[in-house]
């Protein structure tokens, strides 16, 4: 038995022992190879193709961390209500990570009946092959699924992390093996600290997606993601997912932007951005975000410039997450 076959057998055995999994990996791999399109969600949400993945997604996905019950211990009732509401409202892209507290567990309580009709993404912060595999196995257990549509290297921040990831025993080996076995369909790289590190990652490996900050304050930063990462992603047809769209709500304070329509509109109007993920504190806030996404239209250059001008004096406060690593 080859090492890959052994790994696949071990993974299936450990997941089956945890209970509740739907069907065999072989079945899911065959089903996923048949089509990259998801069944239509409510038509009020605009859709875009996520780069070279070929998957057509709504322009808004649900974030699983931040100011949301999805990442809070003891908030299962509120989290389950929000996840169900997101599905009912037309959200088909759910984003989480191994390090987002109980987020994966909460999603795993709601999403299994809809599994074949949604796009499920998680992340690993481990940079070594074996550690990444362990986190993948745990994520699958928590999410009550036997595959991920997208598995991402989480918050890659420094050049030495890139070297570790792409070493002989680096996390890229786990990505390649999991992809080869059909346990993940697409691979991505994420980061909110240093754009040049993300560019280096994109140049080292044919990632399918990247998840990066794209907001109205980024243009004023000395090292902006928008002007450095987006051109490379467009050239390589990488699917771009915008995060930190309202900067944890700071861009929505009085005197900055008029509301989520400008924050989301700015991010989604950047060339090469295909969708965005935004966390929600309440179902009411989630509903408002979906309504905003439903009304999205690409903003004209004059409007984009006006939005940028209103963030110029406070961009450092809105870029606080750039210090996270």
Image (spheres, grey):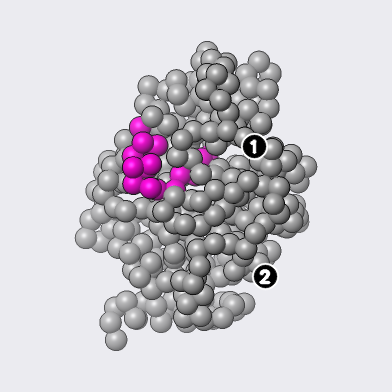
For numbered disc 1, what is the local secondary structure? loop
Q: In this view, does 235 lie to the left or right of 324?
A: left
For numbered disc 2, what is the local secondary structure? helix
Q: In this picture, is 273 found above or below 207? A: above
Q: Quadrant of residue 84?
A: bottom right
Q: Is residue 241 left or right of residue 59?
A: left
Q: Nearer the viewer, residue 114 or 239?
A: 239
Q: In this view, does 217 lie to the left or right of 255?
A: left
Residue at the (42%, 41%) spot, across then down? 191
Residue 19 in view (yes/no): yes
Label of residue 20 in the image: none
Q: Number of numbered discs present?
A: 2
x then y, percent, for residue 159 = 27, 41
Mark 2 burial class by Cα count in 10 Å: few <14, some 14-19, many 20+: few
Residue position marked by numbered label 2 in the rendering: 113
Q: Quadrant of residue 281?
A: top right
- Pick the quarter of the image with the C terminus: top left
- Pick the quarter of the image with the N terminus: bottom left
Boundaries of the magenta span: 228-243
Residue farthest top in this picture: 313
Residue 75 in view (yes/no): no
Mark 1 burial class by Cα count in 10 Å: few <14, some 14-19, many 20+: some
Q: Nearer the viewer, residue 149 or 2?
A: 149
Per the image, is 103 magenta?
A: no
Residue farthest bottom in this picture: 1
Residue position marked by numbered label 1 in the rendering: 296
Residue farthest right in this picture: 284
């Amino acid at each position: 038995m080859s090492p890959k076959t052994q790994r696949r057998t071990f993974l299936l055995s450990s997941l089956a022992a945890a209970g509740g999994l739907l069907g065999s990996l072989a079945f899911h791999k065959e089903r996923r190879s048949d089509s990259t399109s998801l069944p239509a969600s409510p038509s009020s949400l605009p859709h875009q193709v996520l780069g070279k993945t070929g998957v057509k997604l709504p322009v808004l996905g649900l974030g699983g961390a931040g100011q949301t019950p999805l990442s809070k211990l003891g908030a299962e009732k509120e989290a389950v209500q929000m996840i169900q509401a997101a599905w009912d409202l037309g959200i088909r892209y759910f984003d989480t990570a191994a390090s987002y507290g109980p987020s994966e567990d909460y999603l795993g309580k709601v999403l299994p009946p809809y599994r074949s009709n949604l796009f499920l993404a998680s992340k690993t912060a481990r940079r070594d092959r074996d550690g990444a595999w362990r986190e993948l196995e745990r994520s699958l257990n928590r999410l009550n699924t036997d595959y991920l549509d997208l598995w991402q290297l989480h918050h890659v921040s420094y050049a030495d992390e890139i070297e570790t990831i792409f070493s002989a025993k680096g996390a890229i080996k786990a990505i390649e093996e999991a992809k080869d076995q059909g346990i993940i369909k697409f691979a991505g790289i994420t980061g909110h600290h240093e754009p040049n590190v993300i560019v280096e990652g994109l140049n080292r490996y044919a990632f399918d997606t990247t998840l990066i900050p794209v907001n109205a304050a980024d243009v004023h930063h000395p090292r902006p993601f928008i002007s450095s990462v987006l051109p490379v992603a467009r050239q390589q047809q990488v699917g771009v997912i915008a995060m930190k769209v309202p900067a944890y709500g700071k861009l929505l304070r009085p005197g900055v932007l008029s509301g989520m329509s400008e924050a989301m509109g700015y991010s989604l109007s950047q060339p090469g951005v295909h969708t965005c993920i935004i966390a929600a504190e309440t179902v009411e806030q989630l509903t408002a975000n979906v309504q905003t996404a439903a009304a999205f239209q690409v903003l004209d250059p004059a409007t984009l410039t006006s939005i940028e001008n209103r963030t110029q004096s406070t961009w450092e406060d809105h870029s606080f997450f750039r210090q996270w690593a």
